[in-house]
Amino acid sequence: LALELGDSLAIPAFSAAGYSFLSILLTVFVFKETLPPEKRKKAGQAGQTGKTSIARAVLPIIGMLLLMMFGQQFIFFGFESLMGLFTLTRLGLLGQGNAALFLLIGIILVIVQTRYIGKWAKRYGEARMVIVALGLLAGGLLLVATTPEQTHPFYVKAIVENQLVNQAPTDTEAIIGEMAITLPESNNGLGGVLWFVVALVPLSIGSGLIRPLLNTLLTKAAGDASFGVVLGFSSAAVSAANAAAPIVMGLIFQQYGAGMPFLIGSGLMALLVVFALIFFRTVPAVQKAA
């Protein structure tokens, strides 16, 4: 988003540094220790027997939850990485238009995570909400893949061509090289943009739910002594997915068309829904934890 709003490649680095510094200040001066003293002692004793913690972290239940974490992140980050190129080829949108769409996603994420996720998890349980979140992601990606090729009302192909000459490469292009795209012909209207905005709603809600819910299930399954270990594995799974998704999805985009990565992603997310249904019904420990 920082690259979309500015011309300098240094802007994302400065933005990240600023947010990191703000995080440090909040951690040191605002946030208080939430772990009671007696549990800190237990955590220290558990840390001395690290082999036990690691053994618990690789239990089959933890492994299956981590697999779900990797799968959903791989699919969704593929969408994030290619969204700018997709909206360019289908809707004729450039930086400012995509920035507005990412802002919409961010607003929905914040609302879901601050107002609703806790209520829904208490009412329906984390396991059920994971299935709902995966279903929302699958449906949203399917809607994205079927977005009609209709340019936005202010689209002028010649202007877009001129702006693309000096535009910085996307994150995906920075990894796999320049990607040949075909600009849409002028077919201005609101239908395509409205379709895409509607598709972003279930995508954003599902994205706002899935990672916190899976992390909650991971920590409950691991227990107090090992939750730090499994959260570390969770972060590693997310990082691995973020590294692999742009490469794989970018190549699919190049070879099979703009909509194919999202169509495949929708199908894979639907498989994760089936996997989660079977997993949560057949593993009593997860049902008890949720």
Image: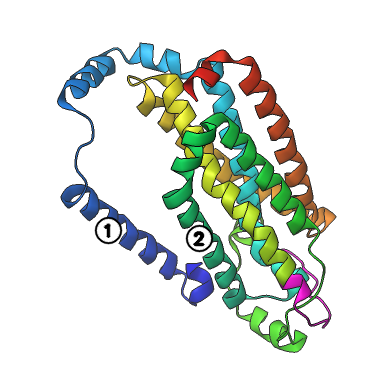
Residue 177 visible to an observer of this rendering: no
Residue 106 numbered tag = 2
Q: Secondary structure at mark 2?
A: helix
Q: Secondary structure at mark 1?
A: helix
Q: Position of residue 230 (x, y in %)?
A: 43, 26
Q: Is residue 182 magenta?
A: yes
Q: Is residue 170 left or right of residue 114?
A: right
Q: Residue at x 71, y 45 (%)?
A: 138
The type of residue carrying mark 2 is: Gly
As displayed, is residue 204 above or below residue 56?
below
Crowding near pointer 1: few (<14 within 10 Å), some, many (20+)? few
Q: Main secondary structure of the magenta part?
A: loop
- The magenta stretch is 178-193
Q: Position of residue 93 (x, y in %)?
A: 68, 75
Q: Position of residue 27 (x, y in %)?
A: 23, 48
Residue 272 numbered tag = none
Kindly identify which residue carries mark 1.
22
Q: Residue at x 49, y 51 (%)?
A: 112
Q: Is residue 4 left or right of residue 201?
A: left
Instruction: Find the distance from the CA under tag 2 to the CA under tag 1.
Output: 19 Å
Q: Position of residue 23 (x, y in %)?
A: 28, 53
- The residue closer to the viewer here, 283 or 288, is 288
The type of residue carrying mark 1 is: Leu
Q: Image quarter for residue 94?
A: bottom right
